[in-house]
Image (tube, rainbow, N blue to C red):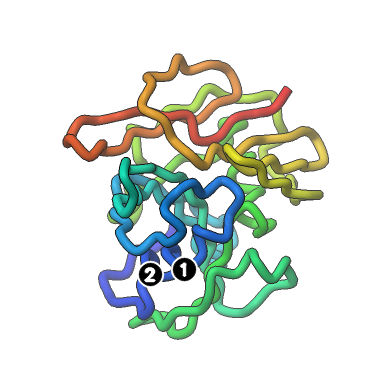
Amino acid sequence: MALIHRTTMAPSKLELLGRWLPSRPWYSGPGRAEDLRRVGGFRLDDPAGAVGIEFLVVTDTGGAEPITYFVPLSYRDAPIDADPDALLGTAEHGVLGTRWIYDGTRDPVAVDRMVALLAGGARAQHGTESGTPDLSVLVAAADLPVTGSAPISAAENPVGTDITVADGQLRVHRVLGRSEPVLRSGQVVVPWTAPDGGTVRSVVLSELR
């Protein structure tokens, strides 16, 4: 069980995201992401307790129209061997010290837990409360192995990131729309708060068949 620390992080997650998002092929904002607002998200536990895994839903309000993105992140106490653009940066955590913050689609532990969630072998956890399952995250289990799904490759496109693992493929949906989804097998659906205060539900993870 991940322990949520009530402390500071400098620079903040949103500051790091604001610098990193415009470099992504699925970013469609005004060329900078300085006006980010967190509007949803959840966490997953690393069974080994070594890696923090968080999924943020953020809305960029800096352009003519607000755009909402889904961003998996991983937090580590040391750097890993990954593509240079997978690292958002480092931050000083008020309790844990220096943390290396990565795009979760390039972190093998985070990918393994995403597949486990899709396969019904992991439970989404509340984003701000320790030891609390997030029952608002809906999962229709896919036919994937629950453990051992290290990523083979990750390819980004204008709508998301497609990850190939040994037993299949999954898509991380990056740009979230306003249409209400119908939950289908091999999908994860999460709620988030729209600019008008209403609740929107979007598919954020899915098995590619």
Q: Quadrant of residue 178?
A: top left
Determine whether the residue tagged by mark 1 lies in a helix, strand or loop. Answer: helix
Label pair 1/2, CB-CB below 8 angstroms? yes
Give the residue at mark 1: 19
Quarter of the figure that contains the C terminus: top right
Vertical placement of 99 versus 87: above or below?
A: below
Residue 15 is marked as 2
Q: Residue at x 69, y 43 (%)?
A: 147
Question: What x and y, as percent, mark residue 27?
Answer: 51, 49
Q: Quadrant of residue 129?
A: bottom left
Q: Quadrant of residue 11?
A: bottom left
Q: Residue at x 69, y 57 (%)?
A: 108
Inspect the image, locate mark 1, and give the three-letter code of the amino acid beneath it.
Arg
Q: Residues within 10 Å of mark 1 (few under 14, many from 20)?
A: some
Looking at the image, which is closer to me, 100 or 70?
A: 70
Vertical placement of 55 versus 176: above or below?
A: below
Mark 1 vs mark 2, CA separation in Å: 7 Å
| Name of the residue lying farthest toward the left | 197
Q: Residue at x 26, y 36 (%)?
A: 194
Mark 1, mark 2: which one is toward the viewer? 1
